[in-house]
Image: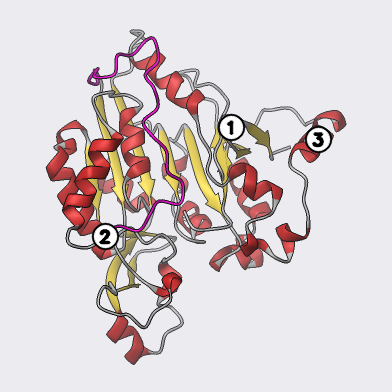
Amino acid sequence: MANVNRRVTSKKSNKQGIPLAHNKANLAAIDSSAPQCSQTQMQAILNQLPTNEFCFSLPWRNQCPITLATKCPENGWLQSYYENFVFSGNGMKSFIALNVGCNKGTDAVKMLRMIDRSVNLDSWRNALKAAAAPHTITPEVCSDDDSPPSSSMVESTPSIVTAQVHCIEPLPITTEVLQKATSLTNYASKGLQIHGTAISSENGTVYFPKPTHQREDLRDFEKVEVGTENKGIGSCAQMEEQEKQKHCVPVSVTTLDSFSEKQLPEDSIINYILTDVEGYDFDVLLGAQNTLRRTEYLEFEFNWKERWALPDRSLTKTIEFLDNLDFTCYWAGINKLWRITN
């Protein structure tokens, strides 16, 4: 996650009775039949998530109250739901999750761990370090430990459902390390799949920065190393062609609908989508309308950078777009949600 980010969670109603709650330093969505908030409820949200000058004129300072409350969310309620649902004999046979812009793979591994406690975050991080050697890995913006197992799920309990967790990462140097780490942990056998592609609103080719291991003339935010989190589709877009050819590499880009059509079982329910693509999240959603119609839970990042600054890519437009797809959106915090829709 880059700086000054907020997470929005989205959820819609479904026949399996998924609970209507979500959170993260970003956004979430739920059943559009949710009633209009009362004045009292709206005032309570404003009191808990006030705004100040940092929200509008100085967002990069990371001092907006919404940013502080939602930049590194925790969704323990969602983990508990899947633990209880998977092991309570309710007939869940498959789990499908997509992590778009998965970076170091931490969130993708957390997705897999929600239904399989034999998956271990520390093991994954150790595998990443080994796979990246002799290079170091950029520190995580939001770092946490393995969540303690609930009473219903023993720590080493393997999954009893078939899992597909798709970790989609376009930065070539990071993708290579992710693939090696997956081999070292054998998590591919548990359902973790790595894809070296970009996701946006249309198919084609885009450029991403090459690694800068050997360059000492760059400031920290300009460097591109394993796990760099502040580089996206726009990083090479403004370069002159000669500079682009020197410092960037072409990467295939596809829509999430095209990806789902090729990679997922036809008409399957998608349990969880998380996007973190450095300002291009709405573009991902625009190319995912068919995919979203069969998705239970969506989480995406909102910030001040790149495409979010465009009038037709505003948060308001995004919420309206998701509302038309029967999602209700929430700010997502640490085991808390603040509704946005209605």
Please tell me which of labels 3 and 1 falls first in the chain: 1
Residue 338 against residue 84 in the figure, above or below: below
Residue 177 belongs to the span the image colors magenta:
no
In the image, what residue type sits under mark 3? Met
Q: Residue at horizontal 37%, vertical 19%? A: 149
**327 or 163: nearer the viewer:** 163
Image position, residue 82 (x, y; %): 40, 21
Residue 203's disc number: none
In the image, what residue type sits under mark 1? Ile
**160 or 126: nearer the viewer:** 126
Q: Are marks 3 and 2 in contact (CB under 8 Å)?
A: no
The secondary structure that dominates the magenta segment is loop
Q: Magenta part of the protein: which range?
A: 137-160
Q: Left or right? Give the position of 179 relative to 243.
A: left
Q: Mark 2 sits on what residue?
A: 136
Q: Mark 1 sits on what residue?
A: 30
Q: Could you give the CA–CA distance between mark 3 and mark 1, rounded to whole angstroms?
A: 17 Å
